[in-house]
Image (cartoon, rainbow, N blue to C red):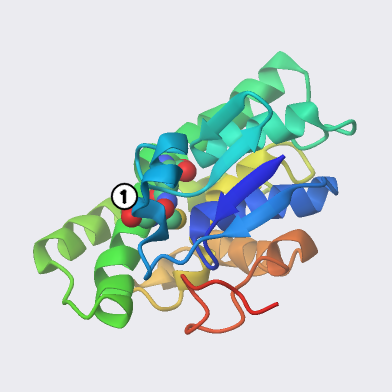
C-alpha cells in the first residue's frame, strides 16, 4: 500500500495516526505542497482534487481521509478502531460525518484563513470567512463539549476512528483566534488525545517543516 501525504496536513496526520495505531506497513510518499506536487498531472490521475491524503492499494485508489481510515481499519487484523458491531460503526461514522460537515469544517476553515494564509501563503485571511467560522465553531464546540462531559473518548470507552477524525486540526487549536475557555471538557479531551503516541508521532517537527518533503 502507498499513501501520498503532506507533512503537517491535518488530514494526512489523521491517516498516518491510524497507520501507526494499527501497526500497518504502508509506504508513505510526502509531496511538496509549495513546489506544486499536488497539481502535477501524474498525481491528479490518482486524485483529481489535487489533495492528500490519497491511498493506493493494488487496483484501488482512494481519497477522502475518513474513507481511507475506514478501509485501513477494516483491512487490519485487529480492527478495534472500527469494530464490526453495526451500532458502534454507525456511531463512529456519525461523528466522522459531523466533524467533516460541521466542527472541523469551521475549525479547519478558521485555521486556513487566520493561520495558514498569512503564515504560509503570504496573504491575509478573509475577515468575513473568519467571522463566519468563529460563529459556526461557537455553535458546534458546545455540542462536542457537552458530549465529552462524562466520557474520555467519542464512542465507547476506548479510542476509535472517531477520535482521530475529531482531533485532526489539533495542531492549530491554540493558534486560531477563538476563545476555547468555555469548553473545558473539549479542552481536556484535546489535551489527552494530542499526547496519544500514534498521534504525537505524526506531528510536524516545526512550522517550517509543514508542507515540505522531510529530510531523510
Ligand atoms: N475532505 C478531504 C480534505 C483533504 C484536504 O483538505 N487536503 C489538504 C491537506 S489537509 C490538501 O491536500 N490541500 C492541498 C490543496 O488544497 O491544494 C479529506 O478528508 O481527505
Q: Position of residue 7 (x, y in %)?
A: 55, 67
Seen at 68% across and 61% down, the residue is: 193
Seen at 74% across and 36% down, the residue is: 156
Seen at 79% across and 44% down, the residue is: 158
Q: Nearer the viewer, residue 90 or 143?
A: 90
Q: In the image, 157: left or right of 202?
A: right
Q: Residue furthest right?
A: 77
Residue 159 vertical position relative to residue 130 in the rendered view, above or below = above
How crowded pointer 1 is (Cα within 10 Å; few <14, some 14-19, many 20+) is rated as some
Name the image quarter holding the N terminus: top right
Q: In the image, 173: left or right of 29?
A: left
Q: Nearer the viewer, residue 52 or 56?
A: 56
Q: Position of residue 176 (x, y in %)?
A: 35, 73
Seen at 34% across and 52% down, the residue is: 39
Name the image quarter holding the C terminus: bottom right
Residue 119 vertical position relative to residue 168 in the rendered view, above or below = below
The residue wearing badge 1 is 139
Mark 1 sits near ligand 1, with its Cβ under 8 Å away: no
Q: Nearer the viewer, residue 31 or 182?
A: 31
Quadrant of res 38:
bottom left
Quadrant of res 43:
top left
Q: Nearer the viewer, residue 6 or 58?
A: 58
Q: Position of residue 138 (x, y in %)?
A: 31, 56
Residue 154 visible to the viewer: no
Q: Residue furthest front?
A: 42
Q: Secondary structure at mark 1?
A: helix
Residue 213 visible to the viewer: yes
Q: Residue furthest left?
A: 128
- The tally of labels here is 1
Q: Position of residue 68 (x, y in %)?
A: 60, 36
Amino acid at each position: 500500500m502507498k499513501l501520498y501525504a503532506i507533512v503537517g496536513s491535518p488530514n494526512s496526520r489523521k491517516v498516518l495516526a491510524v497507520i501507526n495505531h494499527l501497526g500497518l506497513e504502508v509506504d508513505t510518499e510526502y509531496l511538496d505542497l509549495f513546489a506544486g506536487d499536488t497539481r502535477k498531472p501524474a498525481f491528479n490521475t490518482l486524485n483529481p482534487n489535487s489533495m492528500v491524503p490519497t491511498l493506493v492499494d493494488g487496483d484501488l485508489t482512494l481519497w477522502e481521509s475518513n474513507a481511507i481510515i475506514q478501509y485501513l481499519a477494516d483491512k487490519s487484523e485487529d480492527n478495534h478502531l472500527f469494530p464490526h458491531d453495526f451500532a458502534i460503526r454507525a456511531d463512529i461514522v456519525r461523528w466522522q460525518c459531523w466533524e467533516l460537515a460541521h466542527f472541523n469544517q469551521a475549525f479547519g476553515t478558521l485555521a486556513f484563513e487566520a493561520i495558514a494564509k498569512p503564515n504560509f501563503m503570504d496573504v491575509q485571511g478573509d475577515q468575513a470567512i473568519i467571522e463566519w467560522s468563529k460563529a459556526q465553531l461557537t455553535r458546534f464546540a458546545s455540542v462536542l463539549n457537552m458530549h465529552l462531559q462524562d466520557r474520555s473518548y467519542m464512542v465507547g470507552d476506548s479510542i476509535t476512528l472517531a477520535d482521530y477524525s475529531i482531533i485532526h486540526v489539533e495542531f492549530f487549536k491554540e493558534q486560531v483566534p477563538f476563545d476555547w475557555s468555555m469548553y473545558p471538557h473539549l479542552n481536556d479531551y484535546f489535551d489527552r488525545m494530542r499526547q496519544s503516541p500514534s498521534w504525537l508521532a505524526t506531528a510536524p517537527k516545526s512550522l517550517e517543516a509543514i508542507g515540505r518533503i522531510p529530510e531523510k
